[in-house]
Amino acid sequence: MEIRHGLVNATELVSDLVGLYEPAFADRRQRVEMQLPGPVIVGLDASLIGRTLSNLLDNALIHAKPRATAHVRVAADAERVILTVEDDGPEFAPELLGRPLSCGHSTRRRTR
């Protein structure tokens, strides 16, 4: 996979993607709330961050309880940008913490 860095407004990227998910959350009687600072311009691969956030939001939709609220936050300081997604679904097992976003990884049992 080729990583393509470019200057991106991380706040806008997150806001736009979460906006696409809001109807799906509403359909499941769940909510998604954002806590976003002003514009945060960073060098990153927008498609990779978008895919990562999509995976986390999908996880929240699948595993959170009805009427749950997912919280999405962007925070920044002089050295880094932190994207946080929290919900009331089950946490990742300790042995899976290094792999939840790995390609093809799932915590669900596969059926044949």
Image (cartoon, rainbow, N blue to C red):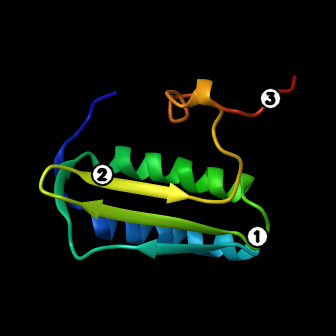
* 5 left or right, relative to 63: left
Quarter of the figure with residue 39: bottom left
- Residue type at numbered disc 3: Arg
- Residue type at numbered disc 2: Ala
Secondary structure of the residue carrying tag 3 is loop
Residue that mark 1 sits on: 28
Q: Nearer the viewer, mark 2 or mark 3?
A: 3
Rendering coords of residue 90 (x, y %):
71, 47
Q: Which residue is at 34% across, 63% downward?
A: 74
Q: Which residue is at 23% across, 76% downward?
A: 38
* 55 left or right, relative to 26: left
Distance CA(mark 1)–CA(mark 3): 23 Å
- Residue type at numbered disc 1: Arg
Rendering coords of residue 110 (x, y %):
80, 27
Q: Which residue is at 36% across, 48% downward?
A: 49
Secondary structure of the residue carrying tag 2 is helix
Residue that mark 3 sits on: 109
Label located before the other in sequence (1 or 2): 1
Label located before the other in sequence (1 or 3): 1
Nearer to us in this view, 48 or 86: 86
Q: Which residue is at 26% across, 54% downward?
A: 81
Residue that mark 2 sits on: 46
Please give the count of numbered marks on the rendered protein. Answer: 3
Rendering coords of residue 15 (x, y %):
39, 71
Mark 2 vs 3: CB contact within 8 A: no
